[in-house]
Amino acid sequence: MSDRAVPNNPLLDFSNKKSLLPIPEDLYQLASEYFTSKELDLLQKAHSVASEAHKDQIRQEGSPYITHPVAVAETLLQLHLDVETVCAGLMHDVLEDSVIQKSYLEKLFGKETLVIIDGVSNLNKLDFDSLEDRNANNLQKMALAMSKDIRVIIVKLCDRLHNMRTIEFLPREKQIRKSIETLELYGPIAIRVGMQDIRVELEDLAFKCIHPMRARMLESAIAQAVGGRKRVVSKLRKQFKYHLKNNDILATVKGRQKSLYSIYSKIKDKKKPFSEILDVFAFRVIVNSVDDAYRSLGIIHNVHNPIGQRFKDYIAIPKSNGYQAIHTSLIALDGIPIEVQIQTKSMETIAGNGIAAHWSYKTKDQIDSESIGARKWIESFTDLNKASIDTNEFVEALKTDLVYDEVYVFTPKGRIVNLKSGSTPVDFAYELHTELGNHTLACRINRKYAPLNIQLESGQSVEIIRSDEYEVSPDWLNFVVTSKARSSIRSALRGQKKSQARKAGKLMLETELKRGGISLAEYPGKALSRILEVIGVKSLSALLTDLGSGKKTGALVAERFFEGLSISKDKSISIQAMVLADHQIEGVSVIYAKCCMPIHGDPITAHSDTERGIVIHHSRCRQVTPHRSNILSARYLSAIWGTNKIERHYVGHLKIHAEDRPGILADIASSFTKANLNIVNINSRDIDAKIIEFIVEAEVLNAESLNKLMIKLRSLKYVTSCSRIINDTKTKNEKTNIYK
């Protein structure tokens, strides 16, 4: 894109068709394949406007600038996009590089075309450095521009594709920056909208630019490997076609080549050797109908043995970006593993071009139903924007949602819901509806109660049990993975913050007043007003909010109340402990401290934290013990466990010393299995030549179950000691852990 603006030259007189510039031959040939004469006239008008706007502008390689928007338009025509999108592609830089006004373009081409041009122009103004350092405001603008019209991102991807094809003419520093941006942002976006062909080319071009030597070495290795594979590929292709034809199925069988960047990524990220990646032969079978696709699957499985648990039916359950195919893995010939994808012709088109493919043969009404996945993702930006209090939160959500593997689960009525891999029932609830998520109480998976933090697996049936009285828990942020759930929880917590602070403040004040043998109800209106005036607040509600948020100290405020009634505090009065039931204390939601990881049944202390609300600590926690002697501390409340209707798994930390013998880890793990406890994490280190130390994190329901396990572990033949870690995180100036 040129930095120069077109001078304010008079525009062509578009009322006279003779004054319009002819459409370039290649552009005309592509457009005439499916454009009407009226649409061709509109395209000619768009080309004339773009030519005038970019008059005298030169690209880095020395060609007229108009060659760039023409190339973008040609790519859009190859995708069979509608005339509005193609015209927008021709004029995507007009607003930025000329004095032409939006109103003028709207008058000539209509509102739809203007929206696309304006959206792409806003994206062109963005300057991305990296996903970490990128200006959050700019990225937010990009996402919202995409949400206004999905065709904005299609044009932008085609724009980026041509820029990457000609990137060698840019300064090296800019080449690297643009290539990284392409890999981190535009490649993943292309995946999400299903434009696989463009994604592959973008990634390969960016990879070659960033690592030219690695790319050349990899290309050379692939060329050598492919030479020896041709015979096998040809034999398998002929075999597939023969068996399919004998069963009256007309099919095209293609060998599928992995992209350069995907091979490099597998070598780099998955630590796989090059030979192992190339050992897998891949084929794509293209048939005429869905019925033929399933019949082909049966025929292929009769010819070669399928590999267990390597079958996926994306026809019955499409990916969220609209991708459909049957995937299967087989053992062929002399034990050679092969991958086969079976698709119809239309599925192949959509697999390559994604949402862009829908404009080639669908009406606008049909587009909505066919491309609902990609549309839903892009339109979710609007909801994210409303739920996010700042742009950094918005960017975090967008980054989270760009690339991920999927799982699919079912509602009780059989509706399929696609979710990010690792999603929990809470993610599922928010995916269905924000209000359902905000009032989630419990869940059933396959008709059995399950914890809310369990990771869902494909094929499960999930039912959410809601309660209008139950509120969002801050703990959910520790395990939800979808951006919608995370942003909705944060939004709900912000709404709860004042309410929770007020509840916590009331709890703190009443606790302090109980120390003096009185209650808040004993203060008449006038007496209360005088006290509030002395304290300097307008209302009791404001006072309680200030107490709960840490702006005022409970003990000092209580002193003013005691003075107001001329009552001296009786420190001998015993204070009833706060009851922790269903993860709440008198209606105030709590969180469990990560420093000491309290478990149901432990002696506990409640700490009123300025930022987090009420935090439950083990009474022997290092953060609590310094305040144990200060009975007037407003922020440390005595607490006991009540009954829990809502089941929760706690994490217990154990330190186990055992003789370093073969099979000792298996013996320890077996004890957890027999106790029906799940090991979350385990680490080991040598204490000396004979003793090894294991640090184990395990999910438990209560302290009793953990104690029973510890007794069993101590009884093992080669275990020398087993103790529970109360504080496993070393705080400042602390060098030892406290053990139970």
Image: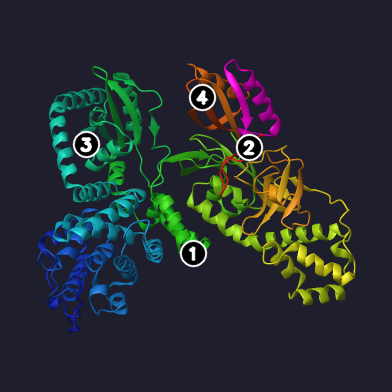
Tell me which label, 2 or 4, sits earlier in the chain: 2
Tell me which label, 1 or 3, sits earlier in the chain: 3
Tell me which label, 2 or 3, sits earlier in the chain: 3
Tell me which label, 2 or 1, sits earlier in the chain: 1
Quarter of image, res 547: bottom right
Q: How many marks?
A: 4
Q: Name the amino acid type tagged 2.
A: His
- Image coordinates of residue 42 in percent, x first then y, are 22, 69
Q: Name the amino acid type tagged 3.
A: Gln
- Residue that appears at 78% across and 76% down: 534
Per the image, label 4 sits on a secondary structure element best described as strand
- Residue that appears at 42% across and 50% down: 401
The boundaries of the magenta stretch are 699-725
Image quadrant in which the C terminus is located: top right
Which of pointers 1 and 4 indicates the residue nearer the eye? 4
The residue that label 2 is drawn on is 649
Question: Badges 1 and 4: C-beta atoms under 8 Å apart?
Answer: no
Can residue 715 be found in the magenta stretch?
yes
Q: CA distance from mark 1 to mark 3?
A: 43 Å
- Image coordinates of residue 480 in percent, x first then y, are 53, 46
Name the disc covering residue 390, or none: 1
- Residue that appears at 50% across and 27% down: 687
Q: CA distance from mark 2 to mark 1?
A: 33 Å
Q: Name the amino acid type tagged 1.
A: Asp
The residue that label 4 is drawn on is 692
Is residue 288 something that shows in the picture?
no
Which of pointers 3 and 4 indicates the residue nearer the eye? 4
